[in-house]
Image (cartoon, helix red, strand yellow):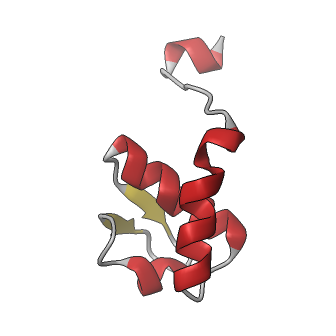
Amino acid sequence: MFLVRHSVSFVDKNEEKCYTIHIKAHHPIAYADAFAVALSQREDATLVTGDPEPRHVESLITIEWLPQG
């Protein structure tokens, strides 16, 4: 099974809501992006994205930028 082989874990979205709401309230960022940022913070993980919107929160997390286009 793909999820087991690749160490995918599931997160209860309710646990992340407070962090997500805080990020969304203080930065011009979409809710889904704020959720990804909150999860990256909690897990001390690098966010890998090609979406330019998280540039607003680059000071909060480590971001690995994928090439655009």
Q: How many marks?
A: 0
Near-viewer residue (43 or 4): 43
Q: In the rendered view of the protein, which quadrant contains the C terminus? A: bottom right
Among the 4 quarters of the image, the one containing residue 67 = bottom left
Near-viewer residue (11 or 2): 11
> Residue 59, position in %: x, y?
29, 78
From this view, report whether residue 17 is shown above or below residue 51: above
The answer to whether any part of residue 5 appears in the image is yes
In the displayed structure image, the side of residue 52 where residue 48 appears, left or right: left
> Residue 39, position in %: x, y?
50, 49
> Residue 9, position in %: x, y?
55, 25
From this view, report whether residue 67 is shown above or below residue 2: below
> Residue placed at 69% from the left, 64% from the top?
32
In the displayed structure image, the side of residue 30 where residue 36 appears, left or right: left
Near-viewer residue (48 or 20): 20
> Residue 54, position in %: x, y?
49, 77
> Residue placed at 52% from the left, 72% from the top?
50
The answer to whether any part of residue 52 appears in the image is no
> Residue placed at 68% from the left, 77% from the top?
30
Among the 4 quarters of the image, the one containing residue 61 = bottom left
Q: In the rendered view of the protein, which quadrant contains the N terminus? A: top right
Near-viewer residue (17 or 33): 17
